Image (cartoon, helix red, strand yellow):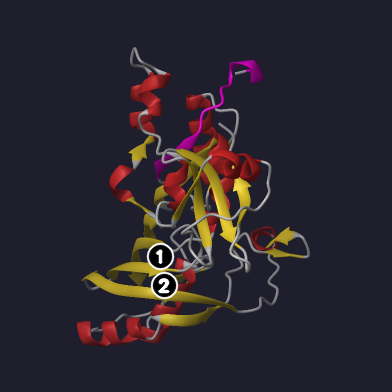
């Protein structure tokens, strides 16, 4: 596909990323299908993981940073009694330990230790950079370096299922939370070790799994007579990324000055915080911030 074949399509696609795909490979597949001029994803999923990967097309890429910083939800399976180099099923086994008999009460007590603000040390097999180099590249060369702990917030952590060797859990957490690290730490708290054997992302605020679509479905849709028009039916509007923000509507001169990047005074606007901006009731202009003097300042504008 040449640049001339691409089109200015705008919106958010809620992709159900399959296991075995990198996030970038999934992004490029969607970009080709939609013939999009511009596209970006909103937070990587490991190849081992499946589930919700919001992909921003066109003007929606201007809001992708908001989704990077959003809370996220996961379902994951812990394999008990086995620790690995990477903290997941892809890594070399480090050690095996007997699991013993674990009551539901003991497991839930261990889970409660990890709810609220917690500190995590990023795993060596991660994209965190040290002196400009991703840690996973150092790890592949057998180099381990000291990593500073990072504070994250676990909002909820629930046990869904247990058997002799596995736990299935549901997690809602802040950005930057490493599920692999959580599983490893949980295994240590239970005295048997653990790693993540399956991981699925189910939500990236404000989106949930209800509107997810698979790559297989997108390929089938693309082959229909309607082609691109049928694919576009799967796109959510650009402003869906900030649907839970207060809305501010402007008209006439105020709309003109906002589009020029100038703050304006809007009657009955919120007194503080971030807002989504509209010309009239329908035309989304972008996002703005309420200044100390009450004016609305545009921060990120979209082009129609």
Q: Residue at x 58, y 59 (%)?
A: 289
Q: Residue at x 21, y 71 (%)?
A: 163
Q: 293 and 241: which one is in front?
A: 293
- The answer to whether residue 207 of the structure is visible from this angle is yes
For residue 17: magenta?
A: yes
Q: Residue at x 34, y 12 (%)?
A: 225
Furthest residue to the top?
Answer: 225
Relative to 173, residue 295 above or below = above
Q: Is residue 81 left or right of residue 291?
A: left
Q: Residues within 10 Å of mark 2 (few under 14, many from 20)?
A: many
Q: At numbered mark 2, what does the secondary structure look like: helix, strand or loop?
A: helix
Q: Which residue is mark 1?
A: 196
- The answer to whether residue 22 of the structure is visible from this angle is no
Relative to 183, residue 101 above or below = below
Relative to 112, residue 159 above or below = above
Q: Which residue is mark 2?
A: 183
Q: 16 and 76: which one is in front?
A: 16
Q: Is residue 56 left or right of residue 38?
A: left
Q: 231 and 19: which one is in front?
A: 231
The quadrant the C terminus occupies is: top right
Relative to 266, residue 12 above or below = above
The quadrant the N terminus occupies is: top right
Q: CA distance from mark 1 to mark 2?
A: 6 Å
Part of the protein shown in magenta: 2-18
Residue 136 disc label: none
Kindly indicate whether the residue at mark 2 contacts the one at mark 1 (C-beta within 8 angstroms): yes
Q: Residue at x 53, y 67 (%)?
A: 272
Q: Residues within 10 Å of mark 1 (few under 14, many from 20)?
A: many
Residue 130, picture quadrant: bottom right
Q: At numbered mark 1, what does the secondary structure look like: helix, strand or loop?
A: strand
């Amino acid at each position: 596909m040449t640049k001339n074949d691409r089109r200015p399509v705008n919106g958010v696609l809620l992709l159900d990323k399959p296991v075995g795909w990198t996030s970038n490979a999934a992004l490029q597949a969607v970009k080709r299908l939609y013939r999009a001029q511009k596209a970006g994803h909103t937070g990587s999923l490991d190849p081992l993981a499946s589930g919700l990967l919001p992909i921003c097309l066109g003007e929606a890429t201007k809001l992708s940073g908001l989704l990077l910083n959003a809370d996220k939800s996961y379902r994951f399976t812990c394999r008990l009694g086995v620790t690995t180099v990477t903290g997941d099923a892809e890594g070399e086994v480090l050690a095996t330990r007997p699991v013993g008999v674990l009551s539901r009460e003991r497991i839930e007590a261990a889970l409660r230790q990890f709810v609220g603000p917690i500190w995590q040390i990023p795993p060596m097999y991660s994209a965190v950079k040290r002196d400009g180099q991703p840690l996973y590249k150092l790890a592949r060369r057998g180099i381990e370096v000291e990593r500073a702990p990072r504070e994250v917030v676990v909002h909820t952590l629930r046990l869904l299922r247990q058997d002799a060797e596995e736990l299935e859990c549901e997690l809602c957490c802040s950005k930057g939370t490493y599920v692999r690290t959580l599983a490893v730490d949980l295994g240590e708290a239970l005295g048997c070790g653990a790693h993540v054997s399956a991981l699925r992302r189910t939500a990236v605020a404000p989106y949930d799994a209800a509107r997810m679509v698979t790559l297989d479905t997108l390929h089938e849709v693309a082959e229909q007579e309607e082609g691109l028009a049928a694919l576009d039916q799967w796109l959510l509007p650009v402003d869906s990324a900030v649907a839970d923000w207060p809305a501010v509507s402007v008209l006439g001169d105020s709309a003109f000055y906002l589009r020029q990047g100038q703050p304006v005074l809007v009657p009955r606007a919120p007194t503080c915080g971030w807002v989504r901006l509209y010309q009239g009731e329908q035309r989304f202009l972008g996002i703005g911030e309420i200044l100390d003097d009450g004016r609305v300042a545009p921060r990120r504008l979209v082009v129609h």
